[in-house]
Image (cartoon, helix red, strand yellow):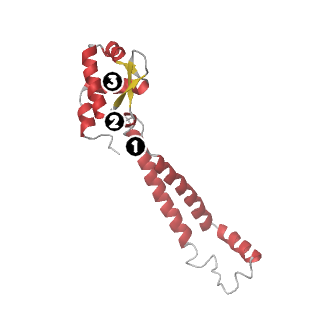
């Protein structure tokens, strides 16, 4: 998959008029004559800019079958305005659950789980040595889960905010 800001895209976006065209096409498809009227540039000049943007893959022609040829943002062009941070949202959601279970483990929820397990399945638990909740090693796992979840959640939130701030590249 090609990068959004490769060499051809940067060259295509180096002109202010082409940047203006891309911003306009963010809203809806336009014809060359419509863009000419909006920008105040001659239709031939706009057509040359549109051709450059098409070659870079930022926009594409949308032939509707009638006499008008509309231009619209391609998938590559839409990525300039829509950040891809969905995976970081998933990490953030998982870290919230990790924080919840880690904190519940630190503040006594493991005692209820241990009591329930021993009362329902005493035969399975035979021979297994129980670790008291007050022993020094009992709280390390919930603490580690909470710390790791906080770190992952903080980093995910940082990446989401960073991608939102850099979404409007143009």
Of the residues tagged 1 and 3, which is closer to the observer?
A: 3
Give the numbered dot on residue 169: 2
Picture coordinates of residue 22, whole percent (x, y) = 34, 27
Does the image show residue 78?
yes
* Image quadrant where one finds the N terminus: top left
CB atoms at circles 2 and 1 under 8 Å apart? no
Q: Nearer the viewer, residue 116 or 72?
A: 72
Residue 110, placed above or below residue 88: below
Relative to 108, is 62 above or below?
Answer: above
Q: Quadrant of residue 136?
A: bottom right
The numbered disc on residue 21 is 3
Residue for point 48% across, 63% down:
148
Observer-nearest of 64 and 168: 64
Disc 2 secondary structure class: loop
Q: Residue at x 65, y 70 (%)?
A: 110
Task: Using the numbered discs, state the Cα–Cα distance from disc 2 to disc 1 in whole angstroms.
Answer: 10 Å
Q: Position of residue 91 (x, y in %)?
A: 49, 54
Say which label, 1 or 3, has the lower sequence index.
3
The quadrant the C terminus occupies is top left
Q: Which residue is mark 1?
A: 163
């Amino acid at each position: 998959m090609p990068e959004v800001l490769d060499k051809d895209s940067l060259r295509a976006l180096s002109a202010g008029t082409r940047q203006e065209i891309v911003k306009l096409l963010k809203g809806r498809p336009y014809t060359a004559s419509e863009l000419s009227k909006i920008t105040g540039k001659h239709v031939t000049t706009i057509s040359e800019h549109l051709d450059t943007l098409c070659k870079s893959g930022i926009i594409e022609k949308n032939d509707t079958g009638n006499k008008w040829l509309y231009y619209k943002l391609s998938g590559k062009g839409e990525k300039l305005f829509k950040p891809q941070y969905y995976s970081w949202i998933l990490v953030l959601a998982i870290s919230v659950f990790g924080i919840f279970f880690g904190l519940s483990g630190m503040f006594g929820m493991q005692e209820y789980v241990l009591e329930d397990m021993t009362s329902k399945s005493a035969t399975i638990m035979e021979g297994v040595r129980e670790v008291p909740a007050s022993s020094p090693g009992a709280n390390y796992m919930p603490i580690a889960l909470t710390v790791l979840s906080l770190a992952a959640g903080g980093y995910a939130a940082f990446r989401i905010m960073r991608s939102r701030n850099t979404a409007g590249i143009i």
